[in-house]
Amino acid sequence: MPDASSARAPRPAGEFTRGRLVLSDGTVFEGQAFGAGTDGIGEVCFNTAMTGYEEILTDPSYAGQIVCFTFPHIGIVGTNLEDIESLNPVVRGVIVRADAEHPSNYRALSALDAWLKKNNIPGLAGIDTRALTNRIREHGMPHGAITRGGDGLAAAKSFPGLVGLDLAKDVSSRQTYKWREMPWAWGKGYDDLPAPSWRATVVDFGVKRNMLRILAGLGADITVVPAQSSFDEVMRHKPDGVLLSNGPGDPAATGTYAIPTIKGLVDSDVPVFGICLGHQMLGLALGGETRKMAQGHHGANHPVKDLETGKVEIVSMNHGFTVDRETLPGHVKETHISLFDGSNCGIRVDGKKVFGVQYHPEASPGPMDSHYLFDRFAAAAKTRA
């Protein structure tokens, strides 16, 4: 285990380097480079979460994106090996107002700067993140490049954008595997599930580990299969329920191979639960359409209303595409909406145990208001177990 005290040591003065964020329209934000010395090119979004930066930066859904944090001080609690949501972070870059050089937390193994270097993620600190956030709110998510001296404008203009881009195949597991790790417990860490009571197959479009942990905590014998698995490959594991995971990119692009599988699942009698990208592709498989959002939803404080109960939940979100409710067929019911902009946040199918939500009920980071959705999925699956 690394020595935490040495890992938290401040950077030598000589390491301070000027850096820039260059947007494709020529706008430039100058600041202080930290993290990896490489350039980062992608779509720039902002995240309003006040905690959980390590979980955010390891969420596979951020493939192709540069994350600007609106909370001013990032890195305060350092980084550790327990809070990651994937082993190989794919975020293109991170932007903060202030990089905390002296993290203070008993779980910290390294400072954010060292962690970014290890994972080859460039960072930029010291810019006016409020100005950048306001620009995204007014004009949408721009293409941009974090650079320490290269031609950032040419790099930003070279980014193709996320529309039409299938990124799930890049972040998905290449092979099928089992999962038994349960949610983290104070003083214990992560225990393994001793005795499963039902079977869940998870289609990995970029799954976060905490989704798997919650399912294991509910007694699921979990098999994770690659994004490009066929209906027969999913059903070969005899699942009592199938979860369609979160992931990055354009759902219509990933749907070219995923929708036939999802249609087969919907036509069967197996319960299906879609989350984020999984929800969007479920909507496509049911006959609906998706569209790109101007600024998307990224944060841990988003209000969502359950139209069937009237309950308002505060949830975590991370998405740049949405299901267009106007295109949904009559047998598909809208169940949840965003109270920020009224966009679709949930659907279910009449007469079937098939439903999906746009947000992240597993949190990590964020509130636990929506954990009941995993209970609902588990209860439906156990009727087949």
Image: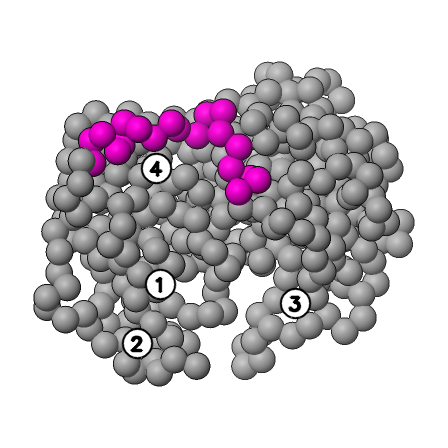
The residues tagged by marks 2 and 4 sit, at their Cα atoms, a distance apart of 29 Å
In the rendering, at what x and y percent does residue 151 appear? 18, 35
**Location of residue 13 (image quadrant):** bottom left
Residue found at x 72% / y 60%: 178
Mark 2 residue type:
Ala
Q: Nearer the viewer, mark 1 or mark 2?
A: 1
- The residue lying furthest to the right in this view is 384
The residues tagged by marks 1 and 2 sit, at their Cα atoms, a distance apart of 12 Å
User: Which residue is at the front of the view, 301 or 62?
Assistant: 62
Mark 4 residue type:
Gly
Residue 26 drawn in magenta: no
What is the span of residues highlighted in magenta in the rendered image?
152-170
Callout 4: 10 Å neighbours few (<14), some, many (20+)?
many
Q: Earlier in the sequence, mark 1 or mark 3?
A: 1
According to the image, label 3 marks what residue?
181
Q: Quadrant of the C terminus?
A: bottom right
The residues tagged by marks 1 and 3 sit, at their Cα atoms, a distance apart of 25 Å
The residues tagged by marks 3 and 2 sit, at their Cα atoms, a distance apart of 28 Å
Q: Is residue 361 left or right of residue 272?
A: left
- Look at the numbered discs 3 and 4 and tell me whether their residues touch, using CB distance below 8 Å: no
In the rendering, at what x and y percent does residue 289 appear? 59, 20
Callout 2: 10 Å neighbours few (<14), some, many (20+)?
many
Q: Is residue 282 above or below residue 238?
A: above
The residues tagged by marks 4 and 1 sit, at their Cα atoms, a distance apart of 20 Å
According to the image, label 1 marks what residue?
118
According to the image, label 2 marks what residue?
7
Disc 3 secondary structure class? strand
Q: Nearer the viewer, mark 4 or mark 1?
A: 1
According to the image, label 4 marks what residue?
42
